[in-house]
Image (cartoon, rainbow, N blue to C red):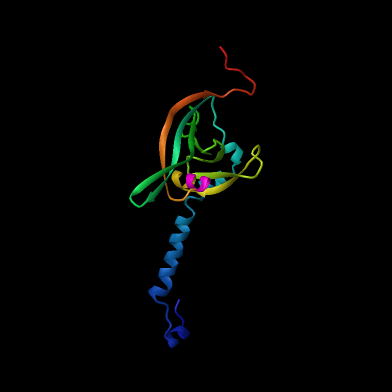
Amino acid sequence: MLTVRALRKGRAMTFRTFVVPASFLLVCGTFGCGGAQKADLEEHADPAELQKIPGSHVLHEWKKIYAIELRGTERVRTPVGFLDHRSSEEDVDGKFFVLDRTHVVRGFVLPSGRAYVFEGTDPASPTPRDLGQTSLENSVKKILGVPGGLEFDVVQSATTRTTEAPGASNRS
C-alpha cells in the first residue's frame, strides 16, 4: 500500500521490490515441504528394524565393488568390498548391504536411497548413523570411504537362503 510519505520521498513500492520476493517465498514454501512426509517416516524408524528382511526365504544377489582410478591412460580397478542385495517375496525391493573386503557389514542402503553406516568399536552391537538420502553409488562411497568412481560386477545372482530360528537345522 502506498503512503503519502513514501510518494514524497520517491520510494514507492515497485514490482521488483515487492512481487518478486513474495513470489520467491511462495515457491520455496510450496516445493520445500513436498517431500518431507516420507522422509519423516524413515527418520523416526528404528535402524535395527529397517535392516530386517521379512519372509521365510531371503534372496541374495552379490556384487563385487571396485574403486576406479585413472593413472595416465591406464585404468586401475581395486577391489574395495561387496554389495549384498537382500530381498524376499514380501520385500521385493529389498535392501543393499555394504561389506568391506573382509566381509564385515559396514552399512546398508534402503530402496528409497537413505543410507546408514555402522559406527562404534564393538562389532557385536554396531550403532547405525544416518547418512541421508542419495544414490546407491554415492551411498556405497560414503559407507566405505572410497573416493572417485566405483564399478559393480555381479558375482552371484539371486540365491535363496531360508530364514530359520537360531539352532534350527536344515537337514532332510
Residue occupying image coordinates x 57% and y 33%:
52
Q: Quadrant of the C terminus?
A: top right
How many discs mark residues in the rendered view? Answer: 0
Where does the magenta region start and end? 140-145
Residue 141 forms part of the magenta stretch: yes
Residue 109 image position (x, y, % from top left): 51, 41
Q: Quadrant of residue 53?
A: top right
The picture places residue 167, in percent across and down from the top left corner, at 65, 21
Is the residue 158 above or below the residue 65 in the image?
Answer: above
Q: Position of residue 26 (x, y in %)?
A: 45, 62
Name the outermost residue toward the left.
73
Q: Judge whether residue 112 is colored magenta.
A: no
Vertical relation: 103 (above or below) 132: above
Q: Residue at x 49, y 24 (%)?
A: 160
Q: Residue at x 39, y 45 (%)?
A: 76
Query: Which is nearer the eye, 19 or 54?
Result: 54
Compare residues 144 and 54 and report the one nearer the observer: 144
Q: Position of residue 16 (x, y in %)?
A: 39, 73
Q: Is residue 59 above or below residue 141?
A: above
Q: Tell me which residue sits at (62%, 19%) in the image.
A: 168
Main SS of the magenta segment?
helix
Residue 107, by quadrant, is: top right
Looking at the image, residue 93 sits to the left or right of residue 121; the answer is: left
